[in-house]
Image (spheres, grey):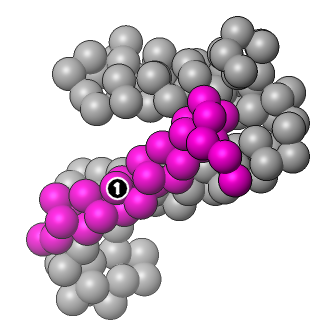
């Protein structure tokens, strides 16, 4: 696999997913431990910190899936799929940044922008 814009963006997306899981487990250690002590089953509906911990961390595997799909598309030269992944993530990042400007969603915006640009043929 050669390193180019497509593979770099796809690998970055995969890394964002891994970081989301790691940061979620570190940042939300207490809510996760409390949910575990409550038996885990149906334990995330009790308060906002647990719900935030759950959804923040659950986004990690979704980002990883998008990264894996982008890597596969890049390896096969499927720029159309790269563009679609980039478009969906670009819209999500823009909505997220509009709602929460002081967030790390700017990293997703950059990665999504590169994927979208490669899908449109603006980057090779």
Above or below: residue 72 compared with residue 95: below
Furthest toward the left, the residue is: 30
Q: Foreground: 119 or 39?
A: 119
At a point 21% along the width and 55% down the height, the residue shown is 49
Q: Horizontally, is 3 left or right of 19 in the view?
A: right
Q: Foreground: 123 or 72?
A: 123
At a point 36% along the width and 54% down the height, the residue shown is 20
The kind of secondary structure element at disc 1 is: helix
x then y, percent, for residue 68: 66, 55
Above or below: residue 99 compared with residue 58: above
At a point 86% along the width and 27% down the height, the residue shown is 80
At a point 34% along the width and 55% down the height, the residue shown is 19
- Residue placed under numbered mark 1 in the picture: 19
Q: Which residues are magenta?
A: 1-30
Above or below: residue 123 compared with residue 83: above
Does 61 appear in magenta?
Answer: no
């Amino acid at each position: 696999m050669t390193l180019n814009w497509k593979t770099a963006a796809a690998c970055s997306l995969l890394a964002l997913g891994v970081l989301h899981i790691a940061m979620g487990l570190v940042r939300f250690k207490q809510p996760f431990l409390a949910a575990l002590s409550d038996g885990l089953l149906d334990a995330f509906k009790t308060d906002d910190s647990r719900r935030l911990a759950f959804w923040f961390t659950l986004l990690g595997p979704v980002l990883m899936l998008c990264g894996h799909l982008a890597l596969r598309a890049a390896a096969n030269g499927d720029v159309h799929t790269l563009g679609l992944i980039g478009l969906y993530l670009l819209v999500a990042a823009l909505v997220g940044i509009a709602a929460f400007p002081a967030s790390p969603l700017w990293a997703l915006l950059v990665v999504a922008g590169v994927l979208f640009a490669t899908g449109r043929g603006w980057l090779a």
